Image (tube, rainbow, N blue to C red):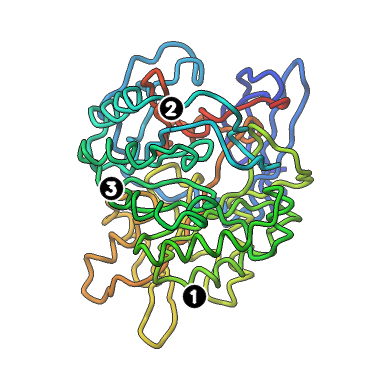
């Protein structure tokens, strides 16, 4: 094994800090680490060493958070954001409920019954975000399932009234599918998009991942978005052996419906909260990049997906597929060089619009296309503090801290 570099990580059993090594056998890339009490871990983190090194070599300017607290104690124990954090947030999540109308076998939240935060408390969260990041940051209302709140439109209105211009609802879509008036009410209140849980194109996938056949409801929710004129991002949790063979089918559906589907977010499953399905071999962002390339019918190659720049280069990758009149779609990364991309990168761009924002500056861009993003979430097995300190996807907590997504959802081997 050749050592590529070292990292600081955690023991997945006791969550104590341990050192780790990133190594390669000449083909794939692995994380090796050991705890004196709980033994060693070997985890495959990338399928191709050359591709891993190429992705990691991207270097973007880092814009620090506007407000950071003093760094007291080690990482995770005093997460704030603190003075060690290197990048400002580009997306802020607010949990508006922990209740849910499903009990998915796979749920990183492990959602259950709990009292919802009141409007006064949510006003405080919005105000804290405004002071910390300004009104242009993207807000995602999440849960649990946000649509179980009867006053969700009022929750949206609170944020819109404070000046937030991008408020997205993270939802399983069940309520949207059966309540014709829900999406128009949310849109009128200031909601700008739907982030729709969408795991495949077959009933069997939903039965295994979500515990029920939800295919019809998912398709109906997309139609509701089309009727309301509300853009939707399809969010696919990818699990090896369950739905990893359906990535191409979901991409094809997204392209076919690009008049309403603005983006496709592929999320390799990670261990957190409730995880009740067998996952004998986890997938990394690198694995999903190669699977997407294989299943795209030649449309996308592995080197067409580039780091998004708003976080560590191994945390997120994407491409904007530009629609050309009568000529299909073309990966945007074939329209400019890597050097141009890094030089023109806009640190204020939300994760899903980095490439579209860059293209918008060019006369040839028509504004039609599909954003494809792959997220490389970390858990206690894969955690890398270097990556965590560059996280731009954050959660605003009830005590008004801003915590990186992967730190917030971290659980040990017992969940």
Residue 217 found in image quarter: bottom right
Q: Earlier in the sequence, mark 1 or mark 3?
A: 3
Q: Is residue 60 left or right of residue 245?
A: left
Q: Which quarter of the rendered picture does the C terminus lie within? A: top right
What residue sits 59% from the left and 77% below the top?
297
Q: Which quarter of the rendered picture does the N terminus lie within? A: top right
Which labelled disc corresponds to residue 403?
A: 2
Q: Position of residue 317 (x, y in %)?
A: 48, 54
Q: Are marks 2 and 3 in contact (CB under 8 Å)?
A: no
The foreground one among 397 and 14 is 397
- For label 3, the SS is loop
The foreground one among 129 and 171 is 171
What residue sits 43% from the left and 36% below the top?
391
- For label 1, the SS is helix
Give the labeled residue for mark 3: 190
Residue 20 found in image quarter: top right
Q: CA distance from mark 1 to mark 3?
A: 27 Å
Considering only vertical position in the picture, is 399 above or below 199? above
The foreground one among 369 and 192 is 192
One can see residue 9 in this view: yes
Considering only vertical position in the picture, is 64 above or below 262? above
Give the labeled residue for mark 1: 256
Q: Position of residue 52 (x, y in %)?
A: 57, 51
Q: Earlier in the sequence, mark 2 or mark 1?
A: 1
The residue carrying pointer 1 sits among few (fewer than 14), some (14 to 19) or many (20 or more) residues within 10 Å by Cα, namely few
């Amino acid at each position: 094994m050749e050592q590529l570099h070292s990292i600081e990580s955690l023991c997945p059993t006791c969550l104590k800090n341990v050192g780790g090594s990133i190594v390669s056998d000449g083909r794939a890339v692995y994380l090796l680490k050991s705890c004196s009490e709980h033994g060693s871990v070997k985890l495959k983190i990338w399928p191709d060493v050359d591709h891993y090194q190429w992705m990691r070599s991207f270097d973007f300017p880092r814009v620090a958070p506007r407000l950071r607290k003093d760094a007291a104690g080690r990482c995770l124990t005093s997460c704030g954001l603190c003075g060690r954090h290197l990048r400002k947030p580009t997306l802020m999540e607010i949990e508006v409920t922990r209740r849910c109308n499903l009990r998915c076998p796979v749920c990183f939240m492990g959602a259950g019954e709990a009292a919802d935060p009141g409007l006064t408390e949510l006003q405080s969260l919005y105000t804290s975000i405004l002071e910390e990041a300004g009104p242009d940051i993207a807000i995602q209302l999440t849960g649990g399932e946000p649509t179980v709140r009867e006053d969700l439109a009022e929750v949206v209105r609170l944020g819109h009234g404070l000046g937030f211009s991008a408020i997205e609802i993270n939802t399983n879509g069940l309520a949207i599918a059966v309540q014709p008036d829900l999406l128009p009410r949310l849109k009128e209140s200031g909601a700008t998009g739907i982030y729709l849980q969408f795991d495949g194109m077959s009933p069997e996938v939903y039965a295994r991942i979500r515990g029920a056949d939800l295919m019809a409801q998912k398709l109906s929710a997309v139609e509701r978005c089309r009727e309301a004129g509300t853009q939707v991002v399809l969010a696919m949790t990818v699990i090896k052996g369950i739905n990893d063979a359906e990535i191409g089918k979901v991409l094809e559906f997204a392209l076919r419906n690009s008049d309403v589907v603005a983006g496709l977010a592929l999320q390799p499953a990670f261990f957190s909260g409730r995880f009740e399905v067998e996952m004998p071999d986890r997938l990394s962002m690198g694995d999903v990049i190669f699977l997407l390339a294989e299943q795209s019918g030649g449309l996308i190659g592995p080197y067409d997906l580039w780091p998004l720049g708003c976080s560590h280069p191994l945390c997120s990758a994407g491409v904007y597929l530009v629609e050309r009149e009568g000529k299909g779609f073309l990966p945007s990364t074939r329209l400019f060089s890597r050097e141009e991309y890094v030089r023109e990168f806009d640190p204020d761009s939300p994760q899903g619009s980095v490439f579209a924002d860059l293209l918008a500056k060019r006369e040839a861009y028509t504004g039609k296309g599909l954003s494809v993003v792959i997220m490389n979430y970390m858990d206690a097995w894969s955690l890398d503090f270097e990556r965590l300190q560059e996280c731009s996807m954050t959660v605003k907590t009830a005590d008004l801290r801003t915590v990186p997504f992967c730190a917030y959802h971290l659980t040990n081997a017992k969940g």
